[in-house]
Amino acid sequence: MHYSSRTHRRKRMAEINVVPYIDVLLVLLIIFMVTIPLMNQSVNVELPSASTKLTDKITSIPIILTIDQNNKLTLNIHKNKNKHLTPHEVVEQVAAHLQYSKSQGKTRNIMVRGDHGVDYQNVLNGIMLLKQAGVSNVGLMTKSEAKV
């Protein structure tokens, strides 16, 4: 038998057109090449003075841990605000105030105020004491820069 060309069926080819996939891949590659160097940039910071703005409405007086030039610790929530406290006393006082505030349904802001001459390590030690007391967020106090 002889088949005519009209009755002869063409074989379908099961190939995937990869050109659109290559285009998408190249676009993603370019996006990653542009964004990765931007993520590696560092931020230059000069401490302890900084330009500050009030970002949150303060509803209560924050708990402030002060580290003076002699690395002595004081708390503004202690009965005698000028009394130097041991690290253990700081943890106990802050934990007690946080627990009381939590039982009242309130949150307290926690701040660290370090003297200009205090070593950075001593400020970190103060922050670690607050973490031991159960503090999750700690702010650093700075003095505002003079406006020219």
Image: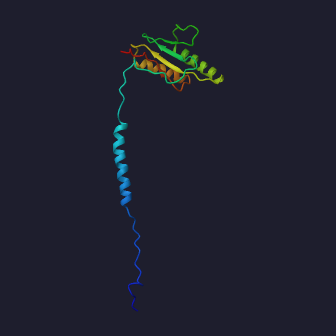
Q: Position of residue 70 (x, y in %)?
A: 43, 10
Q: Residue furthest bottom?
A: 1
Measuring 42% from the left and 13% from the top, which residue is drawn there?
Answer: 115
- Left or right of residue 50: residue 96: right
Asked whether 52 or 95 is in front, the reply is 52
Q: Position of residue 43 (x, y in %)?
A: 36, 29
Measuring 34% from the left and 52% from the top, which residue is drawn there?
Answer: 26
The quadrant in which residue 14 appears is: bottom left
Total numbered labels: 0
Q: Position of residue 140 (x, y in %)?
A: 46, 20
Asked whether 54 or 50 is in front, the reply is 54
The quadrant in which residue 39 appears is: top left
In this picture the colour scheme is rainbow
Asked whether 73 or 31 is in front, the reply is 31
Quadrant, the C terminus: top left
Measuring 52% from the left and 26% from the top, which residue is drawn there?
Answer: 137
Q: Position of residue 90 (x, y in %)?
A: 54, 16
Q: Residue furthest front?
A: 148
Quadrant, the N terminus: bottom left
Q: Residue furthest right?
A: 103
Asked whether 62 or 114 is in front, the reply is 62
Q: In the rendered view, tell whether residue 31 sits above or below residue 2.
A: above
- Left or right of residue 41: residue 103: right
Measuring 36% from the left and 41% from the top, which residue is drawn there?
Answer: 36
